[in-house]
Image (spheres, helix red, strand yellow):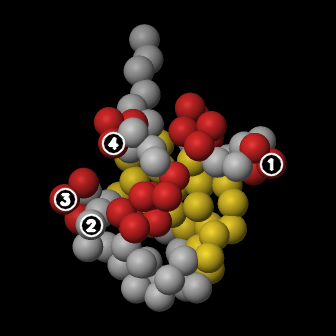
Amino acid sequence: MHITFKLYASLGDYLPAERRRGNEMPLEVAEGATIAQVLAPFALPQKMVHLVLVNGHFVAPEQREAKVLAEGDVLAIWPPIAGG
């Protein structure tokens, strides 16, 4: 099935070079894939996976191992952001 995978801020560096400019890429994943399974091949540092949204809805850390994605979902990940 197909989803859209988005990595924001410094996490964009984990996307293939040709996708970094737009910070997103189409991604084919297995039926029944969870958020954790989609993230695994990208080797994102766990402490950098702060805000996770599926179709604009927050997914809590304890739900990411079990949350199954569906065809057409948009999975977006933000690192912790500091400001002043």
Residue type at tag 3: Glu
Is disc 2 surrounded by few (<14), some (14 to 19) or many (20+) residues within 10 Å?
few
Res 14 quadrant in image: top right
Q: CA distance from mark 1 to mark 4?
A: 24 Å
Question: Can you give x and y, in whole percent of width and height, for residue 5 in the image?
Answer: 59, 61
Q: Which residue is mark 2?
A: 65
Answer whether labels 2 and 1 touch (C-beta < 8 Å).
Answer: no
Answer whether labels 1 and 3 touch (C-beta < 8 Å).
Answer: no
Badge number at residue 62? 3
Which of disc 4 and disc 1 is earlier in sequence? 1
Residue 57 drawn above or below residue 28: above
Q: Residue at 55% of width from left, 67% of height from top?
A: 74
Q: Closer to the observer: label 1 or label 3?
A: 1
Residue type at tag 1: Glu
Answer whether labels 3 and 2 touch (C-beta < 8 Å).
Answer: yes
Residue 2 drawn above or below residue 25: below
Front residue of 40 and 69: 40
Q: Which residue is mark 1?
A: 18
Q: CA distance from mark 3 to mark 2?
A: 7 Å
